[in-house]
Amino acid sequence: MAKKSSIENNKRRQKLVKKFAGRRERLLAVANDENKAMDARFEARLKLAALPRNGSKTRVRNRCEVSGRPRAVYRKLKMSRIAMRELGNKGLVPGLVKSSW
C-alpha cells in the first residue's frame, strides 16, 4: 500500500488539472499561434506561467485504484499488476482467466 499522503497529493493534482484545463488550453492556443502578435503570445506565456504547476496534466501520476501503487499500472483497468493478479485469482475481474499448464 502506498503512502496515504502520496495518494492524496495525486488526487489534489487531478482536481487542479480538471479545474484549470480549459484556461490552460486557451492560453496554449494563443501562445502557440504563429499568426498572433508577439506581444499577445508573450502575455499568454506569462499568464500560463502564473497558473499552478500542479494544474498541468503531466504532474498527475497513474496510480492503482486498489492499492495506490505507482508502477506497473494497466491504464485500461486502472489497476496494478499485483492487484489484478490477486483479484483475478479470486475471480473478481470479468474475462480474466488464470492460465496453468
Image (cartoon, rainbow, N blue to C red):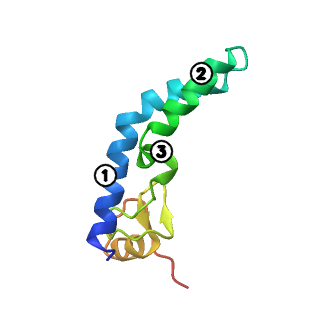
Q: Residue at x 51, y 39 (%)?
A: 49
Q: Amino acid at mark 2?
A: Val
Residue at (40% x, 42% y) in the render:
17
- Displayed quadrant of residue 40: top right
The amino acid type found where label 1 is placed reads Arg
Check disc 2 and report the residue beneath it.
Answer: 30
Q: Position of residue 8 (x, y in %)?
A: 28, 61
Asked which secondary structure carries label 3, the reply is loop
Report which residue position mark 1 lands on.
12
Q: Tell me the amino acid under the disc marked 3.
A: Ser
Q: Which quadrant: the N terminus?
A: bottom left
Which residue corresponds to the image point at 36% horizontal and 77% vertical from the top-left? 86
Callout 1 secondary element: helix
The span from disc 2 to disc 1 (Cα, nearest Å) is 27 Å
Outermost residue toward the bottom in this view: 101
As drawn, 40 above or below 2? above
